[in-house]
Amino acid sequence: MDFAIQDTEEQKEFRAEVRAFLDKNVPPGIEHHVDPNDQPVDQYQLRRELGRRLGAKGWLYPNMPTEYGGADLSADHEMILNDELARIGLALPPYYDSGGRMGGPTILVWGTEEHKKAFLPPIFRGEVRTWQLLSEPGAGSDLAGIKTTAIRDGDHYVINGQKMWVGSAHGADYSWTIVVTDPKGERHKNLSWIMIPMNLPGVTVQPMEVLATGGEGGAGGGCKNAVFFDNVRVPAFNLVGGENNGWKVATTHLEVEHGGTGRLADRRVIQEFIDFCKETHDGYRIADDPDARLQIAELHCEAEITRLFALRNHWLSHAHKPRSYEGPQYSLRRKLSSLDVAERMLRIAGPYALTKDECWAPLRAAIEYFQRDAITSLHPGATTDIQKVIMARRMGTGGREREQAGKLR
Amino acid sequence: MDLSLNDTQQLIQDSAKDFVHGSCERDVLLKFDRGPLTIMDKHWQQMSEMGWAGMAIPEEFGGSGNSLTDVAVLFEELGTGPVPGPLFTSAVLCARIIMAAGSAAQKQALLPGIASGKRIFSLAYTEVQYGWSPERIKMKAKKSGSDYVLSGTKLFIEDAQYATDLLVVAGVEGGAGLSVFRVDAKAAGVSVRPLTGFMVGQAEVILKDVKVAAADAMLNTGDQLARGLLQAAPILCAYKVGGCKRAYEMSLAYAGERKQFNTVIGRFPRVQDHLINAVNALDSARWTTYEALWKLDNNMEDAAGSVHVAKAVASESYVRATDMAHEVHAGIGVLREYGLTLHTKMSRSLYHTLGSPREHHRLLERALKLVA
């Protein structure tokens, strides 16, 4: 076995190339806010600019096909890009792009050639920003229970309904949306996915203030949104994967979302917290307290397991190994272990873990944000209960045939 | 990066699987559990012939010089049994201690016998004030001319009843630090008494004025001893991974057959939760263990920290996985002839071996440099 993400000569060259590229192309003036809610619009724009520059080289979605704007690079190359961006406090993509991250690979599997040509290059080149629209006021865990309709009318679908918990701050160009195309149809056989331009008449975006955003590797925005559709006319071409075939299409989308591919972004705050406990502040060192030390050791074990699950999933998906329950297992682990780690931090650091005060908050209030984020992260991409439901199916409990993981590229 | 087994490891896994599903299958293990038949009567010979006792020993000392990961693959399969016996204690733990602490002459004298399976070593480390930190060792060897004399009680000693030789850990009167003494298990003054109860293969070892020749002493080898323990620990973890795996698989299979309320119980979310907890315990133990092995095989600086994580996690996981298996199986699970309790007992029996999770957390504190 080899757990090393070790650079070969060729990879070393690539890393140097990436580093040189970033040195030259990261726009000056990028600042890092622990709480994405504090990030002003010009910071978002700088990240979009970096996205376009990465996209022009195919490096925004590096393992997507070159012909659609990716670079056909291997997992290892993607990891290097991730590493090098993480080194300067950024993620890949450097901004919240859920519709691209989950929708892109899904369109690649389920779209026609025309769909791929029309939708993928702008996403992969960073020219557009795309949100995913799934949840509704009456449909969270029960995704198949959505009510937003898309009714065929000539060359268009007419969309009506409301989506919730969408995107982040500063709007989007497209929304990759699951809708009901056959309101009288059988459950699971009445759904479709459609790409909706957000500038169409009848689309309204209304921000929702939330505790934290559970951002994508630090790239989240500061809020979630409700999106309303009022007789929005979308070209029929934009429906991807076949009318009423949306539940099947969703398996790919959800496989990406449920951690099937494994995220490698370490929770840097955990290492920073451990280092903080080793420093002397005002004559006191947290790690001198034996109880705190023990808590930190346990916290480290928790974090190691989570890191290894992510690493395993990354390897499984990129080495094209068969996967079953591992995606939801990692998601479940990440959610529950973040909450556990956050609570341990609270026990160890006391009220210092809760303050955002400029004078008193340690680590630029990264612990305070983690307290909120760990709670918020319990629900996006399906609750822990739903992760367990998926896991059980994939494990084949109750003598059932083991459900296969969603199709990935 | 590649987390799959290589060809050598596949072969090791296959032959170990044949053994666990063949000549050492459940009914045989149940006989060992009841006694008086033991694994030594017939199976030890078979295991030795397969070269298993020499895997963790270099070729120059009669072994096959496999990587620790190779050895772990064997022990993971044996753990699915769980196959009891002194293979781990003798051919991994004591062998690695001798390799780390022994002189060239001692290695040459002792290791080939271990590798062939002819000699069986047991580590007499822990005492009445049980614990694996060096401070818990109170026994002191007395100097007598050029020889040493050992007296005292060693408690909860794994597989001592099968041993031809003991490695006794003690201080030396007037000196600091620990030393390792090889003692003939049949020597005058040595008595070994197997302990009964909810434990497997542990014994009381009493030493009464036992003479040890200078040639059998590995003096002032506390650090080397610690290195041997560190290398052996993740192999024991792999054995626990195998145990978790079997406990999970038995539960999954049972939940797919057993019907209550006209439904197979695996359809009930409460039962699924137990199965999910079991598979999570299994995978937590598996990946922390194999990463630690990989770090040891590659002499990586931060290997120690990973071993402590693995040992803490694997010990908890094995107990947890068997607990979950009992939740799923209810009554049938505690029926001795069903076989689950072999794992339940083993998970408890090995929980403290080579250091409890708490002790490894404390060692981890040092590896993480939390202690100033």
Image (spheres, coloured by chain):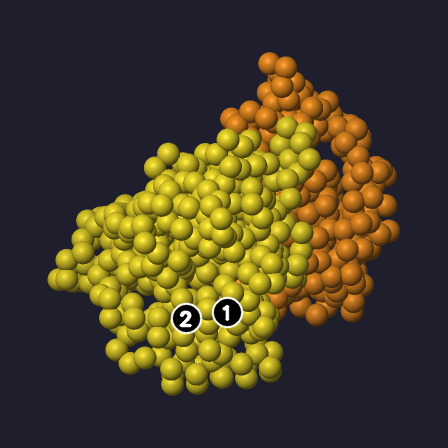
Chain colours: A yellow, B orange
Pick whichever of labels 1 and 2 is earlier in the sequence: 1
- Residue at point 77% right, 55% down? B10
- Residue at point 40% right, 66% down? A128
Q: Quadrant of residue A409?
A: bottom right
Q: Is residue A128 above or below residue A227?
A: below
Task: Compare residues B342 and A362 and report the one nearer the observer.
Answer: A362
**Quadrant showing the C terminus of chain B:** bottom left
Q: Is residue B183 above or below residue A9?
A: above
Marks 1/2: CA distance? 8 Å
Q: State the mark number for residue A127.
A: 2
Q: Residues within 10 Å of mark 2 (few under 14, many from 20)?
A: some
- Side of A366 where A253 appears, left or right: right
Q: Amino acid at mark 2?
A: Glu
Q: Is residue A27 above or below residue B136?
A: below
| x then y, percent, for residue B59 | 78, 67
From where the camera sits, is residue B173 visible?
Answer: no
Q: Amino acid at mark 1?
A: Pro
Chain hosting mark 2: A
What residue did someone put label 1 on? A121
- Residue at point 84% right, 38% down? B22
- Residue at point 26% right, 78% down? A29
Chain hosting mark 1: A
- Side of A258 where B191 appears, left or right: right
Q: Secondary structure at mark 2?
A: loop
Task: Compare residues B250 and A139 and report the one nearer the observer.
Answer: A139
**Cβ atoms at labels 1 and 2 below 8 Å apart:** yes
| x then y, percent, for residue B313 | 51, 47
| x then y, percent, for residue A187 | 53, 32
